[in-house]
Amino acid sequence: MARLRLGVLISGRGSNLAALIAASAHPHYPAEVGFVISNREGAPGLRIAGEAGIAHAVLGGRDASAFAREADLLLRRAGVNLVCLAGFMRILEAGFVEAWRDRMINIHPSLLPAFQGLNAQRQALEAGVRFSGCTVHFVRAEVDKGPIIAQGVVPVREEEDEEALSARILELEHRLYPLAVRLIAEGRVRIAGAKTSIAGASAPEFAFTNPSEERLVSATF
Ligand code: GRF
């Protein structure tokens, strides 16, 4: 079966791009990164693309509609079937979002719909939640909204700062994004209204608490 061809949109560091490239290197992984676009000149992720021999382009200094027009053309020319936003910090024009509807996904560092927008990890710490994590979802016109494909959970540790929590969530992002792409590439993701269902997926049965019950029990009795 032909591999799904990914177009990855970045603005900065590119560690999720690197995770997708690493996954593509496995011969049985059903997707490959075919093209990378950055809206920022000098984004470190561009070097990652270059070193991996992946075609890439910078579309900086354009208004939203020029960006959308040129990005659309480049992605189509490169034969991209799925657009992956990976730390892409620019609002996309509605027409672009519509053109790639159900063929464009995003990763966000929280358990959506909690903590949408910027600084999601800081928002989680300020809210005092015991769990946060990351979400991969289909992109809709509203930022950080859209049918959820997969989520990963990270317990928030007491005394943890934003940097430490972000690093632990990011580690999980690097596993979750390739997993979500694989599910799509295998044709297992069906969109039903505001939700998706995943054929053949299983959820762990175990529910756990933070702080952990075990520790509380042994400390108390
Ligand atoms: C990630 O935390 C991602 O969830 C968010 O932006 C960050 C991008 O990091 N959307 P990187 O550029 O992939 O390293």
Image (cartoon, grey):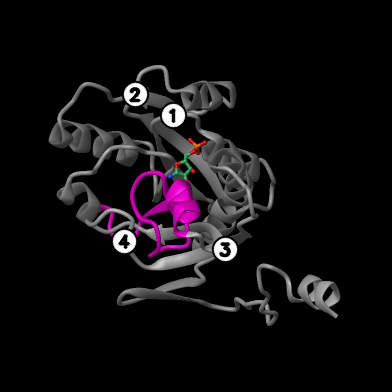
Do the numbered discs 2 and 3 sit on residues whose CB atoms are within 8 Å? no
* Residue assigned mark 4: 145
Q: Report crowding for label 1: few under 14, some 14 to 19, many 20 or more residues within 10 A (C-alpha).
A: some
On screen, residue 103 versus residue 219, left or right, reads: left
* Residue assigned mark 2: 40
Q: Earlier in the sequence, mark 1 or mark 4?
A: 1
Measure how far apart labels 2 and 3 are at the Cα level: 33 Å
Residue shown at 68%/82% (left/top)? 205
Q: Is mark 1 within 8 Å of ligand 1?
A: yes
Image x and y of residue 170, in percent? 58, 45
Measure how far apart labels 2 and 4 are at the Cα level: 24 Å
Residue shown at 33%/61% (left/top)? 102
Q: Earlier in the sequence, mark 2 or mark 4?
A: 2
Q: Is residue 77 shown in magenta? A: no
Do the numbered discs 2 and 1 sit on residues whose CB atoms are within 8 Å? yes
On screen, residue 81 versus residue 216, left or right, reads: left
Q: Secondary structure at mark 2?
A: loop
Do the numbered discs 1 and 4 sit on residues whose CB atoms are within 8 Å? no
Q: Which residues are magenta?
A: 100-127
- Whether residue 106 is visible here, answered yes or no, is yes
Image x and y of residue 197, in percent? 46, 77
Q: Is residue 113 shown in magenta? A: yes
Q: From the viewer's perspective, is residue 39 above or below residue 200?
A: above
List the single residue furthest toward the front.
220
Q: Secondary structure at mark 1?
A: loop
Q: Residue flagged by tag 3: what amino acid is it?
A: Phe
Q: Residue flagged by tag 1: what amino acid is it?
A: Gly
* Residue assigned mark 3: 131
Residue 130 is drawn in which quadrant? bottom right
Q: Earlier in the sequence, mark 2 or mark 3?
A: 2
